[in-house]
Image (cartoon, rainbow, N blue to C red):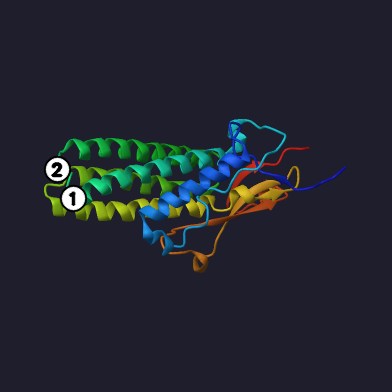
């Protein structure tokens, strides 16, 4: 029987690979247009690597954190699109403290950031129950940074003057970049992971000297024969063919 490596499933509701590659490319283009500083922090070529088709399905809990990564990517793209609208309004002088544009953008961005915070918190709790301290720390940092984005959004919306709004918006830029960078630190390359059947996917911690600017902790996705050999946090186990 052939024992070729099997691609990792992202989640049971994944769309065909061609559509996912197109969507990933659109996400990158939007981020690059919005925040040039992303090139400084060396964000990976994909926010989320394209999922690959496999024949087997697993329970949702067994697909984590990959299924959540796909959802987080979509929410981060939505968040940056909403930020672009707010930035355009600021640049044209349409936003003042308490204005309809500011409040609408604030509510939309706060909702997106809140969704990210909740997902990160759920993953944090998941790895706490799995006794994986590195996973708890990784997603705890992501949750904290999503919360900072929510506070940053509120600071823009409630700024008393145009100059104060611009300063708050600049800080919000940095907070969103910080969140994206930490997401990439956890998810970068996971979709390209190819393991033998019955192997585990594992995100192994990177050394401190290998961290890029903005990363507090980071890891690389690899294949391990047993769950005990993973020193970071586990992803899905590859099903038997």
Residue 36 picture quarter:
bottom left
In terms of depth relative to the viewer, which is nearer, 192 or 202?
192
Q: Residue furthest bottom?
A: 209
Whether tag 1 and tag 2 are in contact, CB under 8 A, the answer is yes
In terms of depth relative to the viewer, which is nearer, 186 or 80?
80
Residue 209, how many percent across, how many down?
50, 69
Mark 1 vs mark 2, CA separation in Å: 8 Å
Read off the residue under disc 1. 165
Q: Residue at x 41, y 60 (%)?
A: 214
Read off the residue under disc 2. 97
Q: Residue at x 61, y 41 (%)?
A: 18
In terms of depth relative to the viewer, which is nearer, 118 or 9?
9
Residue 164 as seen in the image, left or right of residue 193: left
Residue 150 as seen in the image, left or right of residue 118: left
Q: Closer to the N terminus: mark 1 or mark 2?
A: 2
Q: Could one spot residue 137 in this view of the protein?
A: no
The quarter in which the C terminus is drawn is top right
Under circle 1, the secondary element is: helix
Residue 163, how many percent across, how many down?
14, 54
Callout 2: few (<14), some (14-19), or many (20+) C-alpha neighbours within 10 Å?
A: some
């Amino acid at each position: 029987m052939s024992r070729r490596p099997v691609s990792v499933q992202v989640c049971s509701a994944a769309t065909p690979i061609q559509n996912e590659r197109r969507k990933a490319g659109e996400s990158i283009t939007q981020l690059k247009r919005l925040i040039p500083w992303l090139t400084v922090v060396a964000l990976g070529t994909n926010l989320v690597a394209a999922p690959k088709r496999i024949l087997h399905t697993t329970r949702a809990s067994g697909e984590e954190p990959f299924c959540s990564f796909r959802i987080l990517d979509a929410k981060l793209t939505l968040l940056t699109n909403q930020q672009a609208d707010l930035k355009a309004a600021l640049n044209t002088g349409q936003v003042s403290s308490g204005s309809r544009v500011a409040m609408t953008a604030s509510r939309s961005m706060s909702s997106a950031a809140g969704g990210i915070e909740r997902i990160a918190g759920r993953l944090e709790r998941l790895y706490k129950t799995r006794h994986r301290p590195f996973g708890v720390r990784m997603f705890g940092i992501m949750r904290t940074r999503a919360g900072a984005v929510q506070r940053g959004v509120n600071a823009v919306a409630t700024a008393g003057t145009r100059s104060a709004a611009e300063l708050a918006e600049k800080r919000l830029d940095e907070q969103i970049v910080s969140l994206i960078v930490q997401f990439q630190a956890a998810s970068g390359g996971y979709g390209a992971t190819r393991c033998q059947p019955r192997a585990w996917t594992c995100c192994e911690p990177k050394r401190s000297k290998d961290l890029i600017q903005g990363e507090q902790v980071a890891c690389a996705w690899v294949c391990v024969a047993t769950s005990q050999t993973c020193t970071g946090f586990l992803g899905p186990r590859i099903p038997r063919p």
